[in-house]
Image (tube, helix red, strand yellow):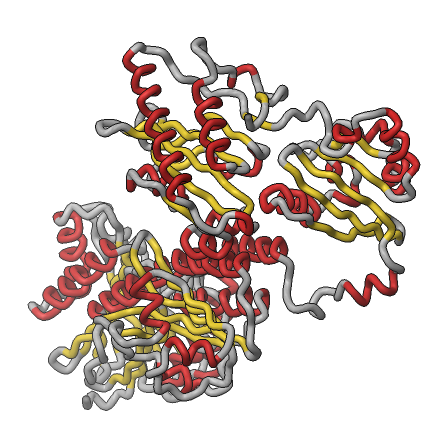
Amino acid sequence: MVGVPDEQAPAARKAPAGGPLLSLALATMMDGVNAHSGAVYLLDADETVLEMAVAGGLPRAFAAPWERVGVNAPIPVAEALRSRRLVWVGGEEDMARRFPRVSVVLPYPFALAALPVATATRAYGAVFVTWPGSDHHELTDREREHLTAAGERLAVRLERAAEESRPVLPEADLLASPAVGSLAGTMGSVEAARMVARLPYGLCSLDLHGRITYANPAAAELIGVPAGRLQGTQLWATVPWLNDPVYEDRYRAALLSQHATSFVAVRPPGDWLSFRLYPSATGLSVRVSRARAVSEMRRAVPPPGDGPGPTRLVTISQVLSLAGALTEAVTVQDVVQLAAQEVVPALGGQALVLLGSRAGRLHVLGHHGYPDPHVVERFDGSPLSSPTPGAHALNSGVPAFFDSRAELERLYPIRHETPDGFAAWAYLPLIASGRPVGTCVLAYAEPHTFPADERAVLTSLGGLIALALERALLYDAKHQLAHGLQAALLPPSLPPLPGIDTAARYLPGTRGMDIGGDFYDVMPLEGQAAAVIGDVQGHNVTAAGLMGQIRTAVRAYTMVGQAPAEVMRSTNELLIGLGAELFVSCLYLRIDAARGRAVMARAGHPPPLLRRPDGKVRVLDLAGGPLLGIDGSATYPTTEVDLPPGSVLVLYTDGLVESPGVDIEDALAELGRRLAEAGDLPLDELADVMVGQGDTEERVDDVALMLLRTRGDGDV
């Protein structure tokens, strides 16, 4: 038998009347194939989740991430249930290739078989059993038949229990008894225990949960904790300087692989101790001894950056860091930059390319680290059917790792590509939401071996990058669509006006990708000109669409000869008649350059600035009415303004003067200062000065600006 139920299991896990059905079934499966550990899962009431009901051979904590898993999860037990067949994972590399999520958490050499627990008509759950990887490379026909038959028998028993309305509850986990430690329990006599106590090096015994069941005086002295305090505790939980995930990882590796493992730790202030872990089916024996001198240890254990690369756990922490960073990535270039900054250095690579697919061809989305950017162009436009590793990874969804150029050319002999100067590569398929979105290519300057745990980490990184890339591609597409729509609703150019020079600028907000409702337009009339600028409330497609309607309405009312006040009143009535829930600020003016006069009507819009020919600037105090769309009976009085030749009118939306933490009066004063100092510049140059073209500060709102300079000649 594998062992007796763990005495520490909670009462809620006691087996129902009728015997420990699941525990006995699991024990029979494991005994029949000499498996090291295993677990039984049962489907929940909705048959959408597999719940671990009983485990044996190893601490349940090892499988904690998979206590409850969806039936569609990419792990062996779920696949066995979905496919209704036995799933065999032959070792560490096989696990890293097919089930990278499992391999990232348990990157140790072990083999696994998962099988469904199902009858011909109904599924009840699934089972997995494991062996130390190096001891069990292939599943024999006898073992396959034994496991399959045992799974079928368990399904029949569960079916009978269901017919008899006997609930099958989770049971106590099966573990070897922790009552006697793996070392102390084998001593067999008091004399043997006394002999161990006299040994000059430390010996202690751990059960399968990592609890200390025995420690000789030498171990207690070396560790610096009395033996009484060590008893019954976990070593890394009791000794502060051993509370490091790397040391616990060695314990997990020993139990899963059933191979001796070791690590070196420093006991403050500077004593180096060596820990050697010898696993068995019932726990571990640990030998503790003094390590070499500190100076030798420092030579043997390179400081960060001097060794061949980071440890697995450090890499996992970098994976988590990358996951957090990628949540902040907005555009495709953000993803490229984060991957280049986080992934490439962490894994010892030197370059990266992100490839996407469009119309059956690969396209370079971004790259980093290539001395000659033209080399990257060989990826661009390659058909997805081409025999290249990038296309194959994207089509198959299977990562490819090449330790050297010789290996790459052996597998892809017909490649006719310009050498990129690198010596090893990882091609990671980027799969998001079940569909391929691209390929990530990592390049290394020197030949590079990819062990199984690193392959698992890289494959998982590919999944994280894929999700971020999918969001970024969608963002970029929507961004282009949104701003393309807005650009189409604004005049592509300003027509010539009699006696007036014009210039305009539109700057979208830098935060998010929402469409703004800012608009402007100018219209030549008989010897005169009309101009309008406005801002629809909101930042969405509705606001942009309404902006297009308002601009069209203003044009129509202008062309039929309505006066400024009437144009504003008619537009207000139209907006209310449309039933729109958005409001609009607007400034409309009619200019007669020959007479040097302008008539203006304002609806809740920021007042314009006027620079007179002598260089003096003032804010125009205009009469006006409420925002358009609020009051159907509102009127909009007009103001007449002198515009002698050389005058400059500055019309703008509130995004130019409103920003968090800045007083609007101060912003207006700064705008007036720019106009006073640069007002004699050509109008296009002045427009750039007024909007602060080239400023790196973020804009929380869109900005529209229109400049009108009178010439007084009345000519177009």
Expressed as whole percent of the image width and height from the top left, the position of residue 567 reads: 16, 62
Tell me: residue 217, above or below residue 673. Answer: above
Indicate whether 149 appears above or below 506: above
In this rendering, position of residue 368 left or right of residue 243? left
Quadrant of the drawing holding the C terminus: bottom left
Q: Nearer the viewer, residue 418 or 576?
A: 418
Q: Quadrant of the N terminus?
A: top right
Residue at point 16% right, 46% down? 579
**Where on the picture, by quarter, is residue 5?**
top right
Q: State the residue in front, 6 or 679.
A: 6
The image shows residue 610 at horizontal and vertical percentages of 38, 74
Residue 184: image location, x then y, percent = 78, 30
Q: Is residue 680 something one can see in this rendering?
A: no
Q: State the residue at coordinates (48%, 76%).
A: 368
Give residue 315's position: percent from left, percent from top. 59, 58
Q: Is residue 74 left or right of residue 179?
A: left
Q: Residue at x 42, y 69 (%)?
A: 427
Location of residue 151 by image quarter: top left
Residue situated in front as seen by the camera: 324 or 63: 63
Residue 596 appears left or right of 252 = left
The answer to whether 424 is drawn above or below residue 86 in the figure is below
Which residue is outermost to the left? 560
Residue 11 visible in the displayed image: yes
In the image: residue 519, left or right of residue 608: left
Residue in front for this viewpoint, 650 or 298: 298
Numbered circles on residues, count: 0
Residue 501 vertical placement versus 147 (above, below): below
